[in-house]
Amino acid sequence: MSICPKNKSSKSRRDKRRANWKMTPPNLIKCSKCGALAMSHRVCKACGSYNKREIISVD
């Protein structure tokens, strides 16, 4: 079997396939300790806490 296509794909068909490659904004949640927006399941950059516990000290 060869990898060459039998027929030419039109520009619209090609571009319809590529239309779903868009970036989505990250899901931000409020930090339970300081209320700042942070990514879920990650340490808050503002206060350094995760799951209401201080993980890193932020100056």
Image (spheres, helix red, strand yellow):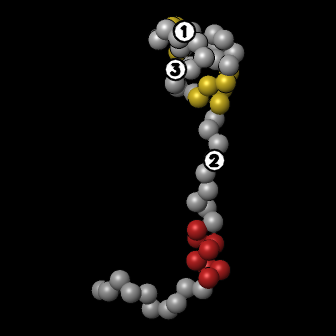
Q: Secondary structure at mark 3?
A: loop
Classed neighbour count for the residue bearing mark 3: other residues with Cα under 10 Å, few (<14), some (14–19), many (≥20): some
Tally of marks: 3
Q: CA distance from mark 1 to mark 3?
A: 15 Å
Q: CA distance from mark 1 to mark 2?
A: 31 Å
Q: Which mark is residue 10?
A: none
Rendered location of residue 17, percent (x, y): 58, 70
Say which residue appears at 61% left-offset and 61% top-offset: 20
Tell whether label 2 touches label 1 (CB within 8 Å): no
Q: Quadrant of the C terminus?
A: top right
Horizontal placement of 5 versus 26: left or right?
Answer: left
Report the amino acid beneath label 1.
Asp
Say which quarter of the image contains residue 33. top right
Horizontal placement of 42 versus 19: left or right?
Answer: left
Say which residue appears at 51% left-offset and 24% top-offset: 42
Label 1 or label 3, whichever lies nearer to me, is 1
Q: Which residue is mark 3?
A: 43
Label 1 or label 2, whichever lies nearer to me, is 1
Above or below, 27 relative to 1: above
Q: Secondary structure at mark 1?
A: loop
Report the amino acid beneath label 2.
Thr
Say which quarter of the image contains residue 51. top right
Q: Secondary structure at mark 2?
A: loop
Rendered location of residue 9, percent (x, y): 55, 85
Say which residue appears at 47% left-offset and 11% top-offset: 55
Q: Which mark is residue 24?
A: 2
Q: Which residue is mark 1?
A: 59
